[in-house]
Every structure is written in structure tokens, then in C-alpha cells.
Amino acid sequence: MTPLMYLSFGLLTTLLVAIDIYQTRGGTISVRKAAIWSVFWFVLAFVFAATIYFFWDVYAPESSYSAEKATLAFITGYLLEKSLSVDNLFVFAIIFQQYAVPEKLRPRALLWGVIGALVLRALMIAVGAQLLAQFHWVLYLFAAFLIWTGIQLTRETGHGEVNPLPEKLLRRLLPITTRYQGKALSVLEDGQRQFTPMLVVIVVIAFMDVMFALDSIPAIFAVTREPFLVLAANVFALLGLRSLYFVLQGMMDKFVYLKPALAFIMIFIGVKMMLVDSQWQIPTVWSLVVVISVMVFATLASVVRGRNELVSIDKEI
């Protein structure tokens, strides 16, 4: 990929973020509106996949990937990142509850948190790509980390309070007020610059998303080590995350099999990474099939369990 292509993609990302800002300008997002935009971002990702298929020689003229391989790698990576990012939504809900974020401020808090995560993930991808290019053994460290994370995920019973480390650092470095001042990150009080809890929320969201990226970025490197495809998959997965949150915020407690599904995917991807460049290497198309199948099965199983519980309650009544 040439610097010009990365610059062009950066401008495209900026445009898409601007569109996302525009569609949430009122501060209130209905479930219907969020659902429409969730579908829009999902379809847009596949439109971008089509451009990869038809214009891959323009995107990366020196790449060893064929157009078909690049397209499949992007779609698999995008669906993988999208699946793993669903767990972020639960953390967003905890952050909003923990910091008592008003409903009207939540879209803006998510927006700036996601923008911060985009920048930090881009840096992490650049570093990860360089490490893999120069030190192949790092791949096995990533794989072991993913498998360990998947095993740990099976042991978790739920989400607790969000790690307050970013808040502690901010409060140590900056004066933080006790009240929200609309969307403002800072205000002047008695002639002194004070920062609002909104800044704390945004920093915590970005920080927690990067913590999740420590799992998801190594996972996508198992699908492809083409930095542009890794970056594009992360960008499109994060762009639709805000809308998806407002679709699912009232139904999060119903996805009871989400964690086991994500744990299985993490372990599977870790094993796939271990087998890269071996005779037992798992084809990308099978990774795509596994990710889709596991998430669909977990969703259907959660729906069935929810209905059975409702039937049991009706019988008791």
C-alpha cells in the first residue's frame, strides 16, 4: 500500500465519521433509527468489499494477494471484528451507568470514544504488522494470548465495574468537575479551566476499546497479515458500533450465550494462528464459516432460551 492510498482511506474514514456525527446531531437516537443505520454500516462494509474485489490492483499493486483472497480476508476479518466488538457494548452500558451519563450525551460520548479507539488501533496495527514482518515468532505469542483469553472468558461470570485506571490518571493530572456541562469537555469556572466528567467517560471508552483490541487485533492477524485489510476491517467494524449499541441496549441481558460463543471464536482463531504456514493451516473461508455459524447459533440459542424462560414464568403464574 502506498502512502497516498492510506491518506485516501484516512479521508474516507473522516467522511464516514462526519456522516455518523450528522445522523446523531439531535442527541437522541431511536431504536428504529439506530437499526436503519446499523444496516447501512453493514451494507457499506460489503460495498467496500466489492471495491476490493474489482480494484485490488489499484489498492495494493505490489501485494501478493489476489483480488479474491483479499476480498475474502476483508470480509472474514470484518465479521470477526464485528463479532468480537459486540462484547464492547456491554462495557459501554456499564460505563454509562457507572458515570451516570445522561441519555442525550451518550451518542456524543460513544462518538469521541470510537474516534479515539480508531486512532489508537491504527497505531497498534502498524506496530503489530512490523513485529510480524520482522519477528515471525511473535505470531505464536499472539496465538497463545488469544487461546488464554478465550479460556479466561469461559471462566467469567459477568461484567463488573469498569477498570478506573484512566479516571485515576485524569484526576491526578487535571481538575475534573462533578457535573456534566452538556457536550463540553471543559469549562471556565472562577477564571480557571476545569474539565467535565464527559472527558472521563470518553477516555474510559477509548481505553476499554483498546483493551478489547489487544484480543481482536491479534485475532485478525490470523486471518490476514495485510495491514490495509486489518485496518479497513477494524474501521468498518467500529463505525457501526454506536448504532448497534442503541439497537441492542434494551436486549443485552438476553444474549446469554454470547460469552461462550466469543470464547470459542477466540480459541479457534488462536489455534488457526498457531497453524499458519503449516500443512494443517486452516483456510480463511473455513474461518468465515466458523465465525458466522457460531454467532448465529449463539443468537438463536439465546432467543430459544429466552422464550422457554417466558413460558416457564407464565406456567408458574
Image: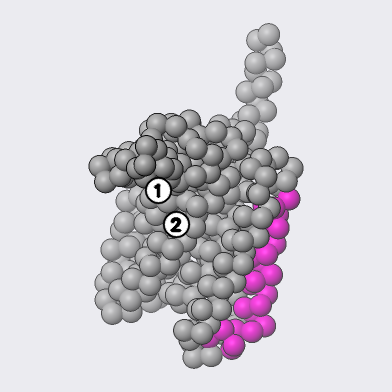
Badge 2: residue crowd in 10 Å (few <14, some 14–19, many ≥20) = some
Residue drawn 33% across the image and 76% down it: 130
Q: Residue 88, how many percent across, how many down?
A: 48, 46
| Residue with the most extreme front position | 191
Horizontal side of 33 relative to 254 (left or right) equals: right
- Asked whether disc 1 touches disc 2, contact meaning CB atoms under 8 Å apart, the reply is yes
What kind of residue is marked 2? Gly
The answer to whether residue 285 is visible is no
Start-end of magenta stretch: 36-60
User: Farthest bottom residue?
Assistant: 62
Mark 2 or mark 1, which is nearer the start of the sequence? 2
* Residue ranking furthest to the top: 317
In this figure, which residue is indicated by the disc labeled 2?
A: 116
Type of colouring? one colour
Our reading of the magenta stretch's main secondary structure is helix
As measured in the structure, the alpha-carbon distance from the residue carrying label 1 to the one carrying label 2 is: 8 Å
Inspect the magenta stretch and tell me whether residue 47 lies in it. Answer: yes
Residue 269: x, y in percent?
43, 60
Q: Residue at x 67, y 83 (%)?
A: 54
In the depicted view, which residue is nearer to us: 165 or 233? 165
Q: Position of residue 45 (x, y in %)?
A: 64, 65
Task: Point out residue 196 in the picture as x, y percentages from the top left corner.
Answer: 42, 40
Say few, some or many: other residues with alpha carbon within 10 Å of mark 1 (under 14 / 14 to 19 / 20 or more): many
SS label for mark 2: helix
Residue behind mark 1: 203
The numbered dot on residue 33 is none
Viewer-nearest residue: 211 or 304 = 211
Q: Residue at x 69, y 13 (%)?
A: 315
Callout 1 secondary element: helix
Q: Could you tell me the amino acid type at mark 1?
A: Val
Question: In this view of the protein, can residue 112 be seen by the observer?
Answer: yes
